[in-house]
Amino acid sequence: MRDLPVRFHTDDYHTGGEPFRVVAAGTVPLPGATVADKRVAAIGSAPVQRVRRLLCSEPRGHADMYGGFVTEPDDDGADLGVLFWHKDGFSTACGHGTIALGVWAVESGLVPTQLSGTRDVVIDVPSGRVVARVAFRDNEIRDVSFVNVPSWVHARGIDVTTGRGPVTCDIAFGGAMYAAVPAAAVGLRVRPADLPELIALGRQIRDGLNALGAAQHPGDARLSGVYGTIFHEDVEPGDTAAGAPFEGLTAEGALHQRNVTVFADGEVDRSPCGSGTAARVAQLSLAGRLPDGAVLVHDSIVGSRFRARVARRVRAHGHDAVVVEVTGTAHRFGHGSFVVDPRDELVPGFVLR
């Protein structure tokens, strides 16, 4: 670790309960002309991987930690770039992190606060250019909408073997490839009590689909492979499987679902998963379950909530696709100043689940 700084400063946020640790630009050298190129370079860089592990692993983090290195954008058409990371590596997309960065951009002074209206924070991520649309009311942030790259259904009806027997999955792209499975199809609910089994099955489904080569991105091989498994269920009035229901928030006629996304190697998204929500909106819209103008009220396993809708329909890589807008908010809960003691035998850290 002698080639690393001895102190790292972070701003720590959560979006719907899911952490996002912001590391300011310039802290870590990230070569590459674009953020997608920087991700490739980071994957192959031992020093950058050590910083990721340092800030993500115990005792400074935990097995489900998430964050991002802020970078310069690909060009002057964006406000910033970001390289997303978690305990297993560097992801191609992150909706909850994009929402958090919208709040961070205002609170850090990168973009000004305004009395009302909206301000687009344009962000380059490995999967493309996205927007954090910050809405203001009375000089304060009301919410943030993540406007994603185009999302589409990549494949339908793929069978994969699991410890609970064969499971039929759809795969949808929302900046990353996601397998979508009704929780009832594996005899489970989206609730904390079933989480250990959902994690195990999420891993099995991801590994099985990737072994089949079922998620090859049609335009960029760097975006191939199933990243996460989304277990979902409809939410009926009075349903309290994930805790007390939200009162007065479900719009009349909206489709209300609950999900948990198991991503990377068994990590669990505490939020409803921004890029996963975009993938689900694509799946539901193209199946006719979410008409244009309708809202998907999307709850997480801990009861936090996003609202999502189709912003517009497009074509992408030969697919009928949708641009999805996912609305939530993020809150800063701390600042970090993490140090590296050269005598510490446990640097960069460990993961104990």
Image (cartoon, rainbow, N blue to C red):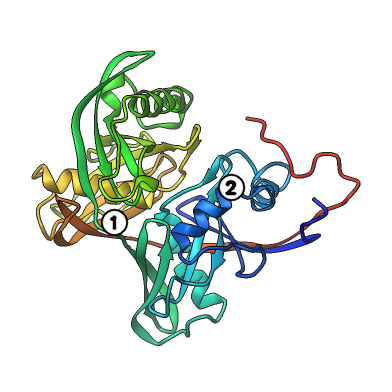
Inspect the image, locate mark 2, and give the three-letter code of the amino acid beneath it.
Answer: Gly
Q: Residues within 10 Å of mark 1 (few under 14, many from 20)?
A: many
* Residue in front for this viewpoint, 280 or 149: 149
- Residue occupying image coordinates x 55% and y 44%: 89
| Earlier sequence position, callout 2 versus callout 1 | 2
| Residue 159 percent across, percent down from the top left | 24, 21
* Percent of width and height locating residue 333: 60, 61
The residue that mark 1 highlights is: 307
Q: Position of residue 350 (x, y in %)?
A: 71, 36
Label annotation for residue 220: none
Residue at 52% across, 63% down: 32
Answer left or right for 38 relative to 217.
right
Compare residues 198 and 85 and report the one nearer the observer.
85
- Is 308 left, or right, of 86 in this rendering? left
Quarter of the image containing the C terminus?
top right
**Element type at mark 2:** loop
Q: Residues within 10 Å of mark 2 (few under 14, many from 20)?
A: few
The residue nearer to you, when weighing 79 against 248, is: 79
